Amino acid sequence: MTIHIGAKPGEIADTVLMPGDPLRAKWAAKTFLDDPQCINEVRGMFGFTGTWRGNRVTIQGSGMGMPSLSIYVNELIKDYDVKTLIRIGSAGGMSPKVKLRDVVIAMTASSLSTPSLGMFKEINYAPCADYGLLEAAVKAARARDIGTHVGGIYSADVFYDERPDLTEQMTRHGILAVEMETAELYNLAARHNRRALAVCTISDHLLTHEALPSEDRERSFGDMVEIALEAAFA
């Protein structure tokens, strides 16, 4: 048990999927896992452990933004010795070639700052995904015949961004999508020698201003969960 996670020793699996929304964690666990058991309710940030095709899996909410995710990832690694962490969440499209419902698998994650910035100081560290997970996720996504993109994403500090110039430069340099967590996930995984990946579904688009209705988001989110699970146990 930690400050933010109420699970007992042994209740968290070596592989953890991390949506930002704790209610999505609950939905994903009950939809995709066999015999899911609630192992965390602290601050309403639900976590569940069950099995998928015989493999133990935990699905734990991370909250919104890198500071929140950093709390949970640090505790999962340091106190529960989690080996594989996969972010599953929504993202906003930033590239003309990315469409609604497409899946973006993040090879790298750019950012203005992260909770790790004080450690790196003057170094512009480039956080990236675990290649084995990345390769397996791409294979799983393409087998499902859904739009799949692999490349760089942007982890923003704020949701309501007022920097159109920054969006323009991100698009110009090939950034596929924006979300708020992945850069710090990749930093922490590298620091502690763990496997990490982010698989995101495009739920809205910064260039076209399109957005998925809530019912379509849930269906697309299901594809993403299955891709993450297949990648974790490939």
Image: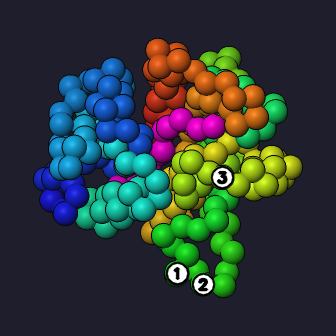
Secondary structure under the numbered disc 1 in the rendered image: helix
**Residue 163 shown in magenta:** no
The amino acid at mark 2 is Lys
Q: Nearer the viewer, residue 226 or 139?
A: 226
Q: Which residues are magenta?
A: 82-92
The amino acid at mark 1 is Gly
Q: Nearer the viewer, residue 7 or 181?
A: 181
The residue under the point 32% across, 38% down is: 22
Secondary structure under the numbered disc 2 in the rendered image: loop
Residue pushed farthest bottom?
122
Residue 162: give its label: 3
Residue 217 appears left or right of 62: right
Classed neighbour count for the residue bearing mark 1: other residues with Cα under 10 Å, few (<14), some (14–19), many (≥20): few
The residue under the point 18% across, 44% down is: 41
Residue hosting label 2: 121
Q: CA distance from mark 1 to mark 2?
A: 5 Å
Return the x and y of residue 11 as percentages of the image width and height. 19, 47
Are circles 1 and 2 on residues that touch, CB within 8 Å? yes
